Image (cartoon, rainbow, N blue to C red):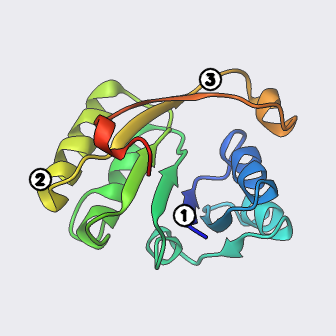
Amino acid sequence: MKTIAFIGLGNMGGPMAKNLLKAGWSVSAFDLSAPALADVVSAGARAAVSARDATTDVDVVLSMLPAGQHVEAVMLGDDGLFAHLPDGTLVLDASTGRTRTRSRCRRAWSRKRRMESWSSRATNACWSWTSGIRRSISCRGSERWCCR
């Protein structure tokens, strides 16, 4: 089974991570909020002590962070995830933030690992993610990665 690192377990991230667990995925989770992390861990996720720890031995990284500066802090820089993730890791960012931040991160990942990350946008209201109703996340990236 593939493992997903889920970083950011707030109003949308927490319910999304729990729905992935219900669907049978293995989830390694991290959030700065101890109650948010505990909630997802109680549903079956592995608790990580940092974003980097969450991405150990995973196939997919999914981030759902509150703003662009949080995405840059987690992904970029010498201690950011992009400096440590192995080639072949699929990175999906569905964070709230500006397109410019997503583009900067996508370019950095592509240069570093010679592959493409996907930027994604979660649709519908926060309440809909807690209901278990199927919701869509629209993604932008190359076709060769869409069926992984």
Asked if residue 20 can be seen in this view, the reply is yes
Nearer-N-terminus badge (2/1): 1
**Residue 27: % across, % down:** 65, 66
- Which of the 4 image quadrants contains residue 44? bottom right
The residue closer to the viewer here, 76 or 106, is 106
**Residue 10: % across, % down:** 68, 46
Q: Is 103 displayed left or right of 41 in the figure?
A: left
Three-letter code for the amino acid on which mark 3 is drawn: Thr
**Residue 127: % across, % down:** 82, 29
Residue that mark 1 sits on: 5
- Which of the 4 image quadrants contains residue 31? bottom right
Q: Residues within 10 Å of mark 3 (few under 14, many from 20)?
A: few
Above or below, 82 against 12 in this view is below
Nearer-N-terminus badge (3/1): 1
Label 1, secondary structure: give it. strand
Q: Residue at x 82, y 31 (%)?
A: 133
The residue closer to the viewer here, 1 or 76, is 1
Above or below, 59 against 139 in this view is below
Residue that mark 3 sits on: 123
Residue that mark 2 sits on: 111
Q: Residue at x 54, y 64 (%)?
A: 5
Mark 2 to mark 3: distance in Å?
29 Å
Q: Residue at x 30, y 42 (%)?
A: 144
Label 3, secondary structure: give it. loop
Mark 2 to mark 1: distance in Å?
22 Å
Above or below, 51 against 98 in this view is below
The residue closer to the viewer here, 46 or 90, is 90
Q: Residues within 10 Å of mark 1 (few under 14, many from 20)?
A: many
